[in-house]
Image: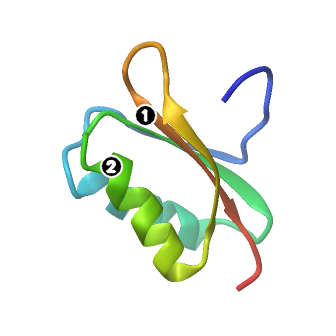
């Protein structure tokens, strides 16, 4: 999440509690076109394992994840052709 990377959709779920970041991510992905990038921002600790686990189960690529300086988590998700 460095530089001027462009995302097709940014989902700010930083004030949401589990399971809302995951549910909102699923909804956002369902509305996106193939080959678009989604950036999810979250502060709920459960998101750190729930989001990558869900993505691996459904075969959606997690391109990058980490923790921002403010302590929030970010997930860069590539919606590819299924």
Quick check: 42 left or right of 10? left
Check residue 33 in the rendering and tell me which mark sits there, or answer none: none
**Viewport quadrant of the N terminus:** top right
Instruction: Provide residue 58's location: percent of width, then percent of height.
Output: 52, 81
Placement of 77 over or under 14, stated as above or below = below
What distance separates the C-alpha of mark 2 from that of mark 1?
8 Å
* Residue at the (26%, 33%) spot, across then down: 15
Instruction: Provide residue 73's location: percent of width, then percent of height.
Output: 43, 34
Q: Identify the residue position indicated by label 2 in the image.
A: 47
Observer-nearest of 36 and 71: 71
Residue that protrudes farthest toward the top in the picture:
69
Name which quarter of the figure residue 71 lies in.
top left
* Residue at the (36%, 47%) spot, across then down: 48
Name which quarter of the figure residue 49 lies in.
bottom left
Instruction: Provide residue 21's location: percent of width, then percent of height.
Output: 34, 51
Observer-nearest of 12 and 5: 5
Placement of 36 over or under 60, stated as above or below = above
Label 1, secondary structure: give it: strand
Local packing at callout 2 (Cα closer than 10 Å; few below 14, some 14-19, many 20+) is: many
**Viewport quadrant of the C terminus:** bottom right
Q: Are marks 2 and 1 in contact (CB under 8 Å)?
A: yes
Q: Identify the residue position indicated by label 1 in the image.
A: 73
Label 2, secondary structure: give it: helix
Local packing at callout 1 (Cα closer than 10 Å; few below 14, some 14-19, many 20+) is: many
Quick check: 57 left or right of 80? left
Placement of 46 over or under 81, stated as above or below = above
* Residue at the (76%, 71%) spot, across then down: 34
Between discs 2 and 1, the one toward the N terminus: 2
């Amino acid at each position: 999440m460095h530089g001027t990377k462009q995302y097709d959709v940014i989902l700010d779920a930083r004030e949401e509690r589990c399971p809302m970041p995951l549910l909102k991510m699923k909804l956002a992905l369902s509305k996106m076109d193939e080959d678009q990038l989604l950036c999810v921002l979250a502060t709920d600790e459960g998101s750190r394992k729930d989001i990558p686990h869900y993505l691996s189960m459904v075969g959606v690529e997690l391109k990058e994840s980490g923790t921002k300086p403010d302590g929030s988590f970010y997930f860069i998700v590539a919606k590819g052709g299924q």
